[in-house]
Image (cartoon, rainbow, N blue to C red):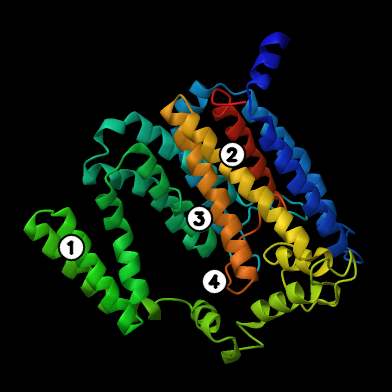
Amino acid sequence: MFKDIYNQASDMPISIIFMAIMLTCLGLIVLSSISTNQFDVIAITTFTKQLLFLIPALVGFLTILFIPKYMIHKYIYAAYSLMLMLILVPFLFETIAGTHRWINIGLPMGVQPSEFAKWIVVVALARYLSDHNLQMKKFMTILFPIFIALVPAIIVLQQPDLGTAIILLTPILPMLYWVGARPFHLFMLVAPVLSIATAFHTISFTVWAICMGSIIYMTRPRLIFGVVFYFGNIFLGLLSPFLWSSLRPYQQKRILTLFNPELDPLGAAYQTIQSKVAIGSGGFLGKGLGEGTQTHLKFLPVQESDFIVSVIGEELGFITIAVMLIIFANFILKIVKLAFLAKERFAGLVLIGIGTIFMAHVFVNTAMSTGMIPVKGLPLPFISAGGSFLVSCFIMIGLIMKMGDESIE
């Protein structure tokens, strides 16, 4: 038995776990600095909580390693159904910070089931797409995969948690492309989003309308379908003001202050301004651990999770941020390489989906910290504080090593 375990371990992409450990250690170092003189009523700091959650994280990682692939494939729909029930449970508890995201387990830390929904949705999509691979050339067959991701995304959106809802949807296009869906069908899925996004600027909307018409002309769908699709998107763009009014006031302010922070420097733009000040003040080498003024004088909000990149920049400098991003880049490229070399379509799809989730988290968190996109609460993998997210990340590492064990290494 031990020989079989050793042979299985030797086939796994070990470098993946090494990079995850390096990033986790960086996170613990930064959290220990943030947690200086930070105690709640039972003297548990953010650093202590993160350290405690490492235990179930490692248990989840090891558990996934010893579950056969066929069992993951066989029971993922059951896990998906259970996940849908679990993300509804927080609505039974009182709100925390105005949201229904956590399940109260009677401890100073709760469980956020939507974090586990991310990889469960990916594996469920991978099973459906791998089982129906030959049918993906038809547009109607790509609607059900969208439904698989859309149902939990809508529930999470009501918590409300827009960031996680978006993350649940991000693996759809890469996984559909990986399984061989027609590019024009993928364009049809993206077009409504671009129609809405460009509608607020006349020139951008005009350029988009020309590009959309050119693509339709080159792909030459049926005439009636092409006309309906084109003018349907134009009409959708004209409805954008009504969609804008459906956003919550704080969401509108975050988008507006992205383009003009001076509109609300002490409100919606405050986090972005303080984040950029922290990163800029750290310079190339940083001020040193525990020496960040923006961090320790509490000018920088949500510093242990959403804006932890700003803490790294202020205390450890640009060089540490650069090294961190290089590790993340190698980490994601490794996952893509494993997917490319995977012998099973199911395994390759799981790897692409998980790689997309990690890439989306890294991009959104770092871009948000530097003011490139509106503020949206998404943690940085392995580094940001968040017990449920840490456990979920290590489970995804287990899935990467499990699905990539026949590829390379």
Which kind of residue does numbered mark 4 sit on? Ile
Spatial CA distance of label 1 from label 4 is: 29 Å
Tell me the residue that label 3 is attached to: 167
Mark before the other along the chain sequence, 4 or 3: 3
Label 2 vs label 3, nearer the camera: 2
Q: Is the residue 54 above or below the residue 407 in the image?
A: below
Secondary structure under tag 1 reads: helix
Secondary structure under tag 3 reads: helix
Q: Is the residue 305 above or below the residue 301 in the image?
A: above
Left or right relative to 218: residue 224: left
Residue 205 placement (x, y as % from top left)? 30, 77
Secondary structure under tag 4 reads: loop
Label 1 Cα crowd, 10 Å radius (few <14 / some 14-19 / many 20+): some
Left or right relative to 191: residue 337: right
Label 2 Cα crowd, 10 Å radius (few <14 / some 14-19 / many 20+): many
Mark before the other along the chain sequence, 1 or 4: 1
Which kind of residue does numbered mark 3 sit on? Ile
Tell me the residue that label 1 is attached to: 229
Residue 103 placement (x, y as % from top left)? 63, 52
